[in-house]
Image (tube, rainbow, N blue to C red):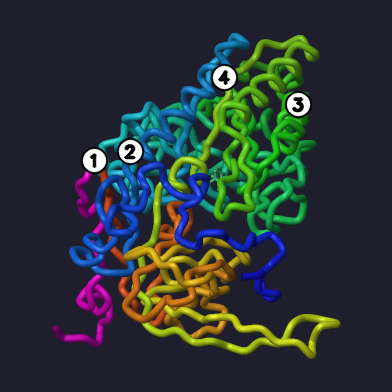
């Protein structure tokens, strides 16, 4: 069988459309004797029967061990150059009280960027001193609460906010530790909406303004300056962008030392993961070593001590740990004309519609993200067919997987699993078309348990003032 001409260039025609590429699936995923996909020993069929679909299934041991591996990699790399690291888990990627506890148990701090995320971290029992608070428009209430609780660091995003935090800390009789978010101007190679350090966007202040703004921070007795902060974007595979941002920030960091302490430097998150087999991921140990090397050599060149380096990855920890299970409702073979000079020719794309969609994974619609898919309840010998996994929403852009090959006998009632849905899927989920958001189930050592329950029809109606239940 040959490749379907409608397939994107990066998609390899598989020898076995049942195979689970290890780089894309959580470490606990495997085919069980029945042929079903199992996550840490629990088969997809059992998960769907007990908890329903769509369903986010988190491989707990995978998430915990990625957190631990990342921390060890950075601890070791920075110890080798005589410094230390603070790792924050970026809660925006996927936060629940249980996930927050896994992260703190692995020795990570937690980064939040709203009062809601703060509430989840507190409900998980996270010590406020281990929290960082982000965001380009924190409300006064969020600032007051953070200061009052003793949140470890507030990342200032503007001068307006600097004054607000100083006032809040002064009024509370506290000294609040702050970082200053810089827009380094480094253009990371990633999708435009994921790149956060281009000049024409809302985050941070230009590097050239940092000395003046830091002087303003230092002028307030109620603020303690921790250091500069940079986050250049997300889903980045190469170290070059991070290295360039670190170099640019360290030059200013060195200047700032003339005016007082600058104990830390925060280089953000953004490490890429494999969504499909076409994504080639740099091992985290290599990234950590690159970070440590560039920071240490730059500090040596500038003649300054190496600061404590903070990082805040989300996707690289939680993204690969999760798969979303769906049930197939309908399938449809659609005859499609080829592009450009081959318009006279046609090929078939099989549309497979599932019981979720853009409400549980907005990323393909939001920025064209690619995912992979496999039949989850069985294996099949049928030849591979090019499929598009569509959701059930009233938008033609409601796509979960733009292109992959599945056994051509995929049929209504089958389960499919989409891997690498741990980051920015549940956290960006919506109730579009009044679909209840799916449950989140954690699987570990052959046991599955709900860590966030499914939204019910009652939940959906509960805020409608016109409903008398
Ligand atoms: C400031 C900041 N830090 C960290 C992150 C986490 O990025 P990632 O999940 O790609 O590691 C983000 C993501 O948007 C961010 O905006």
Q: Quadrant of ligand 1?
A: top right
Measure how far apart labels 4 and 3 are at the Cα level. 16 Å
Q: Earlier in the sequence, mark 4 or mark 2?
A: 2
**Along the line of sight, which residue is nearer the eye, 469 or 445?**
445
User: Could you say where residue 22 lies in the image, as x and y percent from the top left?
Assistant: 48, 45
Q: Does dot 1 land on a helix, a strand or a loop?
A: loop
| Spatial CA span between label 2 and label 3 | 41 Å
Residue 273, relative to residue 382: is it above or below?
above
Q: Earlier in the sequence, mark 1 or mark 4?
A: 4
**Dot 4 and dot 3 residues touching (CB under 8 Å):** no
Q: Could you say which disc has been placed on residue 445 in the image?
A: 1
Position of residue 400 in the picture relative to residue 128 (left or right):
right
Q: Nearer the viewer, mark 1 or mark 4?
A: 1
- Which residues are drawn in magenta? 445-469
Crowd class of label 4 (few under 14; some 14 to 19; many from 20; radius 10 Å):
some
Q: Nearer the viewer, mark 1 or mark 3?
A: 1
Q: Which mark is residue 61?
A: 2
Mark 1–mark 4 distance (CA, rounded to whole Å): 37 Å
> Could you tell me which quadrant the C terminus lies in?
bottom left
Residue linked to disc 3: 252
Task: Please check the rendered image and state whether residue 370 is part of the magenta-colored stretch, yes or no.
Answer: no
Q: Does the residue at mark 1 contact the one at mark 4 (Cβ under 8 Å)?
A: no
The residue sitting at the left extreme is 469
SS of the residue under disc 3 = helix
Task: Please name the residue shown 21% across and 61% down the image.
Answer: 46
Residue under label 4: 308
Please provide percent x and percent y for residue 40.
Answer: 29, 45
């Amino acid at each position: 069988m040959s490749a379907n001409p409608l397939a994107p260039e990066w998609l390899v025609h598989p020898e076995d459309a049942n195979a689970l590429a290890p780089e894309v699936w959580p470490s606990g995923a495997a085919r069980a004797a029945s042929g079903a996909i199992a996550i840490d020993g629990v088969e997809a069929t059992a998960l769907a029967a007990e908890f329903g679909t769509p369903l986010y299934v988190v491989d707990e041991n995978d998430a915990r061990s990625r957190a631990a591996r990342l921390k060890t990699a950075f601890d070791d790399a920075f110890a080798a150059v005589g410094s230390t690291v603070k790792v924050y888990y970026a809660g925006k990627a996927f936060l629940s009280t249980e996930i927050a506890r896994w992260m703190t148990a692995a020795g990570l701090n937690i980064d939040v960027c709203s009062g809601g995320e703060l509430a989840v971290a507190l409900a998980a029992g996270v010590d406020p001193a281990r929290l960082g608070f982000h965001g380009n428009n924190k409300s006064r209430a969020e600032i007051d609460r953070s200061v009052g609780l003793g949140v470890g660091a507030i990342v200032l995003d503007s001068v307006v906010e600097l004054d607000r935090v100083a006032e809040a800390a002064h009024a509370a009789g506290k000294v609040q530790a702050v970082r200053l978010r810089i827009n380094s101007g480094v253009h990371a190679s990633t999708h435009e909406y994921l790149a956060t350090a281009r000049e024409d966007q809302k985050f941070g202040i230009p590097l050239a303004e940092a000395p003046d703004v830091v002087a303003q921070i230092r002028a307030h007795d109620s603020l303690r300056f921790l250091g500069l902060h940079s986050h250049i974007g997300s889903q980045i595979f190469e170290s070059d962008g991070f290295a360039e941002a670190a170099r640019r920030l360290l030059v200013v960091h060195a200047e700032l030392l003339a005016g007082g302490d600058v104990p830390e430097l925060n280089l953000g998150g953004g490490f890429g993961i494999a969504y499909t087999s076409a994504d080639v991921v740099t091992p985290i140990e290599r990234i950590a070593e690159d970070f440590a090397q560039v920071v240490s050599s730059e500090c040596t060149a500038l003649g300054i001590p190496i600061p404590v380096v903070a990082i805040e990855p989300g996707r690289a920890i939680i993204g690969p740990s999760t798969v979303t299970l769906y049930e197939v409702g309908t399938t449809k073979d659609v005859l499609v004309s080829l592009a450009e000079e081959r318009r006279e020719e046609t090929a078939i794309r099989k549309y497979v519609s599932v019981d979720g969609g853009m409400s549980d994974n907005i990323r393909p619609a939001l920025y064209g993200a690619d995912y992979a898919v496999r039949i989850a309840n069985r294996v099949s010998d049928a030849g591979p067919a090019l499929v598009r996994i569509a959701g059930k929403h009233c938008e033609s852009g409601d796509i979960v997987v733009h292109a992959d090959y599945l056994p051509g006998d995929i049929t209504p009632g089958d389960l499919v699993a989409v891997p690498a849905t741990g980051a920015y899927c549940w956290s960006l989920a919506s109730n579009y078309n009044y679909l209840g958001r799916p449950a989140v189930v954690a699987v570990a050592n052959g046991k599955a348990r709900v860590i966030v329950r499914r939204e019910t029809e009652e939940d959906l109606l509960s805020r409608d003032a016109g409903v008398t239940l």
